Every structure is written in structure tokens, then in C-alpha cells.
Image (cartoon, rainbow, N blue to C red):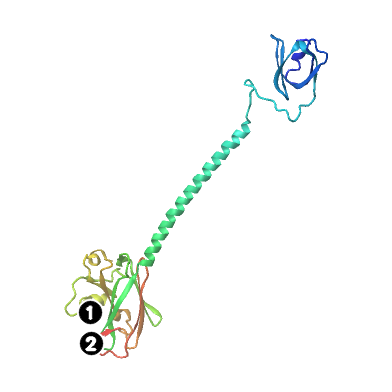
């Protein structure tokens, strides 16, 4: 067969009829005509039996077939070239970017939540563990023992409490369901001293001072001078708040027998110190335990 005819069928699936010289019967080979060696006169064919060579002079006829069998897989050569879609590459890069952005958002959100949880936890622990404690309440009557003119409220921080700032503490007093005193603890209504008078706490803050102020604070135990210097009360400190009841209850001149008064000492952080005072029916002494 002429080589120029064979060249037209390179790459096609063909039925090739060959007959060797001296043979009576022809043979048939079916496969893909891969290449043509014009110099040596051979044809390279990829059939079901594998890759092989046929001599052009032995080829009697070649007939191309319209379809390639399903079981046939064409092998790739070194000179074959492949390409990848640019769209697939764009989608792949976009997926990486989306994953990176999502990871960044998750990390930032987790850090924000962690910092917020730490802040809330610290504040909650401080609120729960801190607070003001009322130790004792004592009253002091007038000379005729008709009214309680002053009450002394002993205060200290609760067990395990943080230091409390008296500058940020509020005091509330209620009498006959009415608020009769609502003032900042140290807002121009105070006298703080570390020296207790020999006549007792009710003479430590002189009458002229309490006549113009509703209450004052006495530092009873203040080893680090935190109360007198910085108005802060720590866990080992003890202070007494002296309230001028004659100034608070001006119409009555003080707390009458069988009278009732309630109050709260509200620190900046933590629980309040709450008390309820029921005065006795008669005042037999000037100093009255309430």
C-alpha cells in the first residue's frame, strides 16, 4: 500500500488487513494507527494486544471505523499537551480566600468573647465577694432621755471582700416609709479622726461639727491609715458612722421611743449593709443598744 494513503489515517481507529509474502491467508488487526515511520516503512498500531508495528508493504487494505470501542483507552505521549480551565483556578483561589476570611472572623470573634468573658467573670466575682457589713448599732439620747440624738453604726468589709472606697459609698435612712437621708458618704458631711475621745465615740465628733453635718466617720481600727488618708476601708479596718438623728429628723428632734428606722450602706462594688433599728419603749440610759 502506498505510504501517502496510510498517512491520512494516522490517529484513527482502523481495521487493517495484512498478508505476509508466501502466506495464503490474510490476517486482520484492529486498533488505533498511532504513527507512521516513513523511513523504515513501518506503521505503529495500538490494538487490544498492545502496541505493535506492521510493515507497510504487508498491508493489503485499511478501513477506518466510525467509533472507538468503549474498552479502548488511548495512552498519552510525551509530546501530548494538556490544559486546565482558568475558571476552575479562579474558583479554587476564591475558596481559599473565603476560608481565610472566615478563619480570621472566627479567631477575632473568639478573642473578643474570651476577653468579654474574663471581664464579666472578674466583675461578677468582685460583686459577689465584696460588700459592706454592719457590725453593731448604738444610740445616744439627749439629756432628758426622750430622743435618740445620735446613732453609731459600726462597719467593716465582708469576709473576702475587696477594699471599699468610702468616697463612693452611699447611705440611706428611712423613717415612717420615707427616705430621710440619702447622701454620699464623704460629700461635705463628714469628720474623720483616728483619736477616740475618752468620753466615748459620741463625744469624739463634737456637737458643733454634727450640728452642721448629718453624719461623720470615725476610724476605730486603721493600721495602714487607709481610712484617714485615702477614705478606703480594707479587710482589717473598722469604722463607725455617727449619724446626727436630730438633724435628720428635725421635726421630731431625733428618734422617739418605739420608733423604727431602717437603712442601707451601699458601696460602689458589692452587696449593701442593711440594718433595721427598733428603739425600746423607754430610754433608761443615754447609751442605748439598738
Q: Is residue 234 above or below residue 91?
A: below
Q: Is residue 131 left or right of residue 63?
A: left
Query: In the image, residue 276 lies at what x, y percent?
Result: 36, 80
Query: In the image, residue 119 lies at what x, y percent?
Result: 40, 57
Q: Residue at x 70, y 19 (%)?
A: 52
- Name the foreground residue: 76 vs 42: 42
- Name the foreground residue: 35 vs 260: 35
Label at residue 101? none
Quadrant of the rendered image containing residue 46: top right
Q: Is residue 10 left or right of residue 169?
A: right
The mark tally for this picture is 2
Q: Residue furthest top?
A: 39
Secondary structure state at the residue bearing disc 1: helix
Query: In the image, residue 201 lies at what x, y percent?
Result: 22, 78
Earlier sequence position, callout 1 versus callout 2: 2
Q: Residue furthest right?
A: 24
Q: Residue at x 31, y 66 (%)?
A: 164
- Name the foreground residue: 34 vs 92: 34
Q: Is residue 174 left or right of residue 73?
A: left
Q: Which residue is mark 1?
A: 202
Mark 2 surroundings within 10 Å by alpha-carbon count, few (fewer than 14), some (14 through 19), many (20 or more): few
Q: Is residue 268 above or below residue 288?
A: above
Q: Is residue 129 above or below residue 250?
A: above
CB within 8 Å, label 1 to label 2: no
Label at residue 143? 2
Mark 1 surroundings within 10 Å by alpha-carbon count, few (fewer than 14), some (14 through 19), many (20 or more): many
Secondary structure state at the residue bearing disc 2: loop
Q: Is residue 198 visible?
A: yes
- Name the foreground residue: 227 vs 270: 270
Q: Residue at x 38, y 67 (%)?
A: 128
Q: Residue at x 26, y 90 (%)?
A: 284
Gap in angstroms between the C-alphas marked 1 and 2: 13 Å
Amino acid at each position: 500500500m502506498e505510504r501517502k494513503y496510510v498517512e491520512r489515517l494516522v490517529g484513527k481507529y482502523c481495521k487493517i488487513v495484512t498478508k505476509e509474502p508466501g502466506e495464503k491467508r490474510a490476517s486482520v488487526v484492529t486498533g488505533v494507527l498511532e504513527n507512521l515511520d516513513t523511513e523504515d516503512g513501518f506503521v505503529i498500531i495500538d490494538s487490544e494486544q498492545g502496541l505493535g508495528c506492521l510493515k507497510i508493504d504487508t498491508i493489503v487494505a485499511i478501513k477506518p471505523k466510525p467509533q472507538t470501542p468503549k474498552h479502548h483507552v488511548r495512552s498519552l505521549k510525551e509530546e501530548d499537551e494538556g490544559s486546565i480551565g482558568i475558571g476552575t483556578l479562579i474558583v479554587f483561589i476564591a475558596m481559599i480566600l473565603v476560608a481565610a476570611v472566615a478563619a480570621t472572623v472566627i479567631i477575632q470573634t473568639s478573642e473578643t468573647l474570651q476577653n468579654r468573658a474574663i471581664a464579666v467573670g472578674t466583675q461578677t466575682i468582685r460583686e459577689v465577694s465584696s460588700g459592706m457589713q454592719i457590725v453593731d448599732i448604738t444610740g445616744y439620747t439627749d439629756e432628758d432621755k426622750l430622743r435618740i440624738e445620735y446613732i453609731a453604726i459600726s462597719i467593716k468589709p465582708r469576709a473576702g471582700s475587696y477594699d471599699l472606697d468610702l468616697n463612693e459609698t452611699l447611705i440611706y435612712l428611712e423613717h415612717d416609709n420615707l427616705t430621710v437621708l440619702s447622701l454620699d458618704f464623704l460629700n461635705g458631711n463628714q469628720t474623720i479622726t483616728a483619736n477616740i475621745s475618752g468620753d466615748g465615740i459620741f463625744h469624739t465628733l463634737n456637737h458643733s461639727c454634727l450640728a452642721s453635718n448629718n453624719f461623720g466617720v470615725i476610724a476605730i481600727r486603721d493600721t495602714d491609715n487607709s481610712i484617714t488618708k485615702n477614705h478606703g476601708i480594707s479587710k482589717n479596718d473598722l469604722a463607725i458612722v455617727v449619724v446626727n438623728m436630730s438633724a435628720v429628723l428635725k421635726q421630731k428632734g431625733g428618734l422617739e421611743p418605739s420608733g423604727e428606722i431602717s437603712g442601707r450602706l451601699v458601696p460602689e462594688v458589692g452587696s449593701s449593709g442593711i440594718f433595721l433599728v427598733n428603739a425600746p419603749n423607754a430610754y433608761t440610759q443615754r447609751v442605748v443598744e439598738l
